[in-house]
Image (cartoon, grey):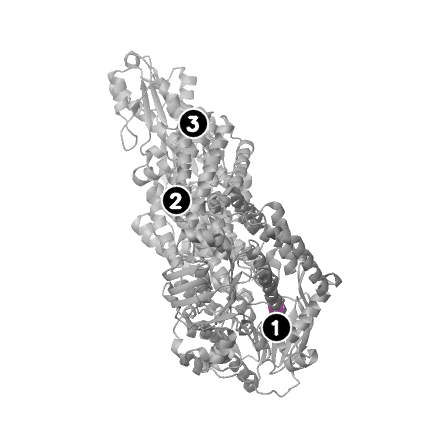
Amino acid sequence: MRATTILRLGVKELWSLARDPAMLVLIAFGFTATIYSAATAIPETLNKAPIAVVDYDQSPLSERITGAFYPPQFLPPERITQAEMDARMDAGRDTFALVIPPDFQRDVLAGRSPAVQLNVDATRMSQAFNGSGYVRTIVNQEVQAFVQRYRADARPPVELDVRVLSNPNLTKSWFQAVMKLVDMITMLAIVITGAALIRERERGTIEHLLVMPVTPFEIMTSKVWSMGLVVLVASGFSLFAVVRGLLSVPLQGSIPLFLCGVAVHLFAVTSISIFMGTFARSMAQFGLLMMLVLMPLQVLSGSVTPRESMPEWVQTVMLAAPNTHFVMLSQGILSRAAGLSVVWPQFLALGLIGAAFFGLALARFRKAIATMA
Amino acid sequence: MTIPPPNNASGAPDRAAVARLTDVGLRYGKTCALDAVTLDLPADRMVGLIGPDGVGKSSLLALVSGVRRVQVGRVEALGGDMANAAHRRRVCPRIAYMPQGLGKNLYPTLSVFENVDFFGRLFGHGRAERDCRIADLLASTGLAPFADRPAGKLSGGMKQKLGLCCSLIHDPDLLVLDEPTTGVDPLSRRQFWELIDRIRDDRPGMSVVVATAYMDEAARFDWLVAMDAGRVLAAGTPRELLTRTGTPSLEAAFISLLPLEKRSVHRDVVIPARTATGEVAIEAVDLTKRFGDFVAVEGVNFRIERGEIFGFLGSNGCGKTTTMKMLTGLLPTSDGHARLFGHEVDANDIETRRQVGYMSQGFSLYTELTVRQNLVLHARLFQVPKGEIPGRVDELIDRFGLRGVIDTLPDSLPLGQRQRLSLAVALVHRPQLLILDEPTSGVDPVARDGFWEQLADLSRRDKVTIFVSTHFVNEAARCDRISLMHAGRVLVSDRPTALVEKRGTATLEEAFIGYLEEAAAVDRGPEAGGQKQGARRRESEESSRGSRGVTLPAPDSRFSLRRLLSYSRREALELRRDPIRLALACLGSVVLMFVMGYGISMDVENLNFAVLDRDQTTASRDYVLNLAGSRYFTERPPVTDYEDLDRRMRAGDVSMVLEIPPGFGRDVERGRPVQIGIWVDGAMPARGETVRSYVQGVHAQWQADVARRRLGQRETAVPATIETRFRYNPDIKSVVSMVPAVIALMLLQIPAMLTALSVVREKDLGSITNFYVTPVTRLEFLLGKQLPYVLLGMFNFLLLTAFAVTVFGVPLKGSFLALAAGALVYVACATAMGLLISTFTRSQVAAIFGTAILTMLPAMQFSGVIDPVSSLEGGGALIGGVYPTTHFLTISRGTFSKALGFADLSASYPPLLIAYAVLLGLSVALLKKQEA
């Protein structure tokens, strides 16, 4: 009889969700538009970087260099004086300021190897870092082309043969699309499961269930399976239609295996959501709690920056979060075509985390519902 | 005096109208709350609006007191048009309004004194006057001993008395009370009306307009208006109504005034006599429940026989619900026993639960499921055999008259039908015991009587034991036996008739009052006996006479700092007592800064790499050491072959593998071309890119070294060199760039969200009414709400700055004052943004998510956190140009990293100030001083 109770209650959850337009819109929006925009919003290359030039030389060569910066990578260069430069950089108006010294062209032609100074506002991390490489390459090319006789041809004796696996061109949108999907799975699972619990609690229906021949275990399991199923179906759809279809991201590994991973992750996340739901009295409190929980889960999971660059102890603590393992698992399966033999530790970790939170939530459930309602 | 006929104002005496409605209509969406009401309410009297819930009483009162906007028709109160804002401003200090719902206009976490004090401040009383008035009011309502208790922990009756204190602090000329005694025990009700009488004796010129669903109370009013379905049925003195209808009681009079179709279903409830069975269905022995220090239920005993209707009478918060929850196993008992059919109640005992049907307060139905789905779901959960379900559901649908609505959602049903459905749901599994927690509250008298007929039928015909709680005395009279509960204890338990006999009173109500008075005397001990109370009251009357003589200062119609600060003070007090909001306010920003500071980093360090060394010579090892020695790379155990390489790359164990070909050392020595293979994991493109460029950099260095060492030759001369100076952040560390940006993000999002919540919470909880009915202006209200959050924001600013300098090691190179000044204006902008968001969100959830999206997206994407605003295009660039974060970010990075001061950053302050003015102006313009 137990299984049928769990089934019935789960079906009831599905009905409830089907009649809640706000949640349906949120799910649809989260799994389509959000992923699409996240994958396409970040420019692959430098875009409209502001640059200024202090040209002491005023020669054909300096003109040539200045003219080599143009949209879309750069804004048309501002010609400024040395005095203006500091103020402009302080005010954050330019990211780059190039200073071409007097007699630059003469010195180049004389082979004296003069130095161009490139000032970079290093508080603007990504633009500063990527952009300074661009600027250097452009200046070098222009000088080389101007000098012509230095068309370097000599091959260096030891060469590097760099082969990038799984994403040969290092296309950022592939990564973004998959990671956004991972984030959405976590966020929506927490939101809809929490909402399903707190809605019942605010209306008092959960008390009714508790006086029926229904156990907290059955109530929780029904929410886990039904809400998990919704997110699983939505993420499967998103994976095929949006990630692979619309964004044409090549997915390497076994998709059934990935969806199994999603299912285990959903077990863990929905359990956490119910656990959080036993603390919050209202949807508003749940929302605030989520602000404090969701962000660390997502940002520190390794989906934004690699885990290696975080402090050691942060890495250790984050091993208790399901997202960390889910990110590893998704990257393993979808990007590197890893099989179960490789990602089984992540499956195990997710299962254990899920079981632990499910157990904690179960232990708190009856008491929390009865005393807070 | 002539009786003014309903819907006709002409007959009403002219001079004596305190409020006059002409053809007033009101709609909420599709529902029509008031339909062409024309009515004069006489002045200097106690006017009662009678009728069940949802007939338009509250709407009418809200219109008269100016809380709700007039849609159709004309509403006059205290001699002016209530649609006119200037008139509303003028008369609002003369009107007091107490909304429906226990303690709706109170702040539950604030103490009794703090609540009254807040209203006193709003009306501009000085400290001495306030203290004097509060002492007077608390003494006369008997609340003085509880001055420090939070309003949320008062009993229903006390809450209402406190609400009355809050309404009366400014000596109003028109007191509007919306169902002030619903859910209050009989004694408190009587005390409440006595209190009103005394106040009217003191101030004979005060008009009182009351709505009530209790017909027995209506008899004490001077003038009555009977309402139904948004219309006035009749108006006149109680005696007039009785004579007109020729009925003995107002309840009967009301029913006979109803339109024919509503009346026809009604007949008097007769409950047949019961034959005792002797079989015990429920037994409670010394049942006790404690929540911490608070004893909710203390030593409750009763035995209920099978088939008995057992009533539980008491006010809200007296322990009825807690007792019922213990009987159902929802709450564990702290002490004592509860037995159902001889079995100890046990939360894990599934079998007993099958015999129990439970109906909680407020009809907990699944509103997303149709009537039929609700019934079927419950039948299945109770494991009714599958074949029997359709038959059982049909039977219930017929029995409870739900045939016409089987496929509708419960929310669209009238309350009476929802109540019947709720009972049907509780009965679906043929329970032997029904536990009903206030099943009739909010339902009109006709539906209530119908419901009791059903109960009688169940008890007498099906021998179902019914345990029902109520706060209606006339319902209690219908039970076989009743228990009177007060403050967690059962005062008495017997047959209704026996109770009346025992006390020697005329009615059951008086008998109860007698018991409650006894209990109250025991509670307070000798100190608070009736005489003493009277004495104290006289005393306080005398002491207050002086203060009452003082005429109130005319409320300042423009800006009042006092009113503003009274809102700030209250907000701060409330925030201090809400752990979740307080945690978010104080720690949220630090936690999130920490997360983002470490999490969003563009530095890539300690990358794992491994080597597939097919050469194994000094040269190859030297090459590897070159890499392993840099801080960017960490060497892992070597790779043995391609298969191993593949496996470890897949597992994400290494992000780069270096393959050194056989004969590497020899070939380098001889200057023959050699290729080193590099495998980079592209799963994270940013990391892959960094790995590639690091390797290339290290390789170039190595090559130059080799060339210099072996051949002693200089590098090939280049025509020009480029010296790159990474200014402000020479080590190009992410934290230096991220931390000032995170401060900007945190000071925006959290203060904005808390401010938005603070306003929307009031809408959610109903205390926003106080803003509608008190003289506080929109600007005062908003600034008052904002001020505590600005201070909190500045506290967070200091915390974040300290954190940035100490934990993250980002030095503050520039002027701290410049930064702090920027932060102050910025936090003001952020909180003003919260205010603006609060004007168009209705629920707290919407406020949270709305604020998160509206602040995070523009701040992250368009304000220069990642890419400078000048690099943006189109709408993004436009938003970025005016968004406060853009300008504060310039100040934050300028002072932190660029060592700048006021003078250098002067261009960034004006846009922030303008943004603040615009945001605040918009909020004031969009905030409504009345309900729509």
Is residue B885 among what the camera can see?
yes
Tell me which residue sits at (60%, 53%) in the image.
B548
Which one is earlier in the sequence, the residue at label 3 or at label 1? 1
Is residue B898 among what the camera can see?
no
Secondary structure state at the residue bearing disc 2: helix
Spatial separation of the CA atoms under disc 2 and disc 1 = 51 Å
Query: Whole-percent x and y of residue B594?
Result: 52, 39
Quickly name the residue at label 2: B922
- Dot label at residue B905: 3
Report in which chain the residue with disc 3 lies.
B
Query: Whole-percent x and y of residue B813?
Result: 50, 26
**Badge 2: few (under 14), some or many (20 or more) residues near its Cα, within 10 Å?**
some
A138 vs B244: above or below: above
Which one is earlier in the sequence, the residue at label 3 or at label 2? 3
Same chain, labels 2 and 1: yes
Q: Is residue B163 left or right of residue B653?
A: right
Q: What residue range appears in magenta?
A: B319-328
A121 vs B450: above or below: above
Secondary structure state at the residue bearing disc 3: helix
Q: Nearer the viewer, mark 3 or mark 2?
A: 2
Tell me the amino acid under the disc marked 1: Leu
Report in which chain the residue with disc 1 lies.
B
Figure quadrant of the C terminus of chain B? bottom left
Tell me the amino acid under the disc marked 3: Leu
Spatial separation of the CA atoms under disc 3 and disc 2 = 27 Å
In this view of the protein, which residue sits in the foreground, B404 or A161? B404
Dominant secondary-structure state across the stretch colored magenta: helix
Tell me the amino acid under the disc marked 2: Leu
- Dot label at residue B313: 1
Spatial separation of the CA atoms under disc 3 and disc 1 = 70 Å
Same chain, labels 3 and 2: yes
In this view of the protein, which residue sits in the foreground, B848 or B910? B910
